[in-house]
Amino acid sequence: EKSRLSQKLLGFMNFQTSREEVVSDKNSKDQKLSKHVSSMSFVETFLDRLTGTSREGKVIAEWPDEEDSCSSTASFRFVQISSASQLDNIAKEAHAIVLAGGTLRPFSHVAAELFAKDAEVMVAASKAEAELSDTYDHATNGPPSSVQVTPSLTTFTCGHVIPPSNVLTSCLSIGPSSRKLDFRHATRSTTEMIDELGFSILSLCDAVPNGFVVFLPSYRYESQVFQRWRSTGMLQQIGKKKCIHREPKNSREVDDLLCRYSAKASATKEGALLFSVMGGKMSEGINFADHLCRCVLVAGLPFPDITDPILKEKMSSLDKEKRDAGMGITGQEYYQNLCMRTVNQ
């Protein structure tokens, strides 16, 4: 690292290539390695990661799918499983560390992710979370402001700026056709479920004034939904109720879309309908205030793919720590927290 050998080798190779370069076919689609990033730097980074413990990360081998003609070679990569070691040096040198954000709860989840080696922080985080849950105001459904101070951890949470009387939260389990709404992976892509979702949104458009935002589980599912609704005429029916807007694929188009949606949502009582994706470009950092959003519909719960090898390793690692140390969170709790964090955003 100190000798910067990889960068020196890159400079030498670029010099040699420029001397021996042969004009190639302009239509060639062969991918070329970057002349600005050394290939050796990837090897160097990979070897550096291997110097850590097995708890910090794993090497994942990926084999080509026989049915996928695009993938013909096997590959392997290092995957970070625990981030706690990354904060060790900072925690030792700093007088205090401040973590600020809108989705830092449960505290026990954050502690397990970043301070798993610090038993005092882990215990304090679990205690703060338990006490906050015990003081939850069930009469008004409002979380109170709370400060918990210990020698190793101070936690602060505050109530919502909107009074509970101004918010109605409801779980819609049956659609207008008396069909059960089931958005699990195995059933959500069926034509019956997509149609029932369309009927539900169509009915809600009659009751919701101004802005109406719908969050779907993934970009792929969003495409399936629109394709089905176009073929059945459902999209045209919804369009007669509210002007439809879709989350753009290009991040540069987000501001333009928000301007158009805001104008339509605020101008008339009929308003506008915005389709977004949970965890996507428009799921955080945007304030849909007042007329911009009088209703939010979350279609299903965005649980991550349980078969993902990285997620499986992470859950297995948390289960082992829970068994060995007797504190922290289980893999299943981590899995559920990932889902609810996405919804909270």
Image (cartoon, rainbow, N blue to C red):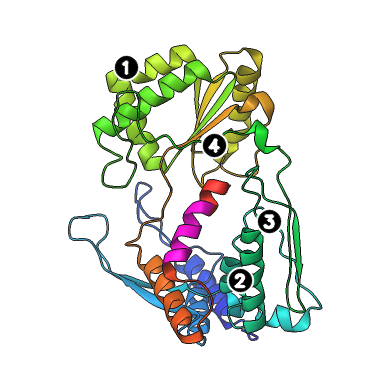
Label 2 is placed on what type of residue? Ser
**What crowding class fits label 3: few (fewer than 14 Cα within 10 Å), some (14-19), or many (20 or more)?**
few
3D distance between C-alphas at marks 3 and 1: 42 Å
- Region in magenta: 332-340
Nearer to us in this view, 82 or 2: 82
3D distance between C-alphas at marks 3 and 4: 23 Å
Reply yes or no: does residue 90 show up in magenta: no
Mark 2 / mark 1, whichever is N-terminal: 2
Q: Nearer the viewer, mark 2 or mark 3?
A: 2
3D distance between C-alphas at marks 2 and 1: 51 Å
Position of residue 312 in the picture relative to residue 297 (left or right) = left
Q: Nearer the viewer, mark 4 or mark 1?
A: 4
Label 1 is placed on what type of residue? Gly
- Which label was assigned to residue 126? 2
Q: Residue at x 62, y 34 (%)?
A: 167
Label 2, secondary structure: give it. Answer: helix
Residue where numbered disc 1 is placed: 233
Q: Position of residue 248 (x, y in %)?
A: 51, 34
Q: Position of residue 163 (x, y in %)?
A: 70, 37
Mark 4 / mark 1, whichever is N-terminal: 4
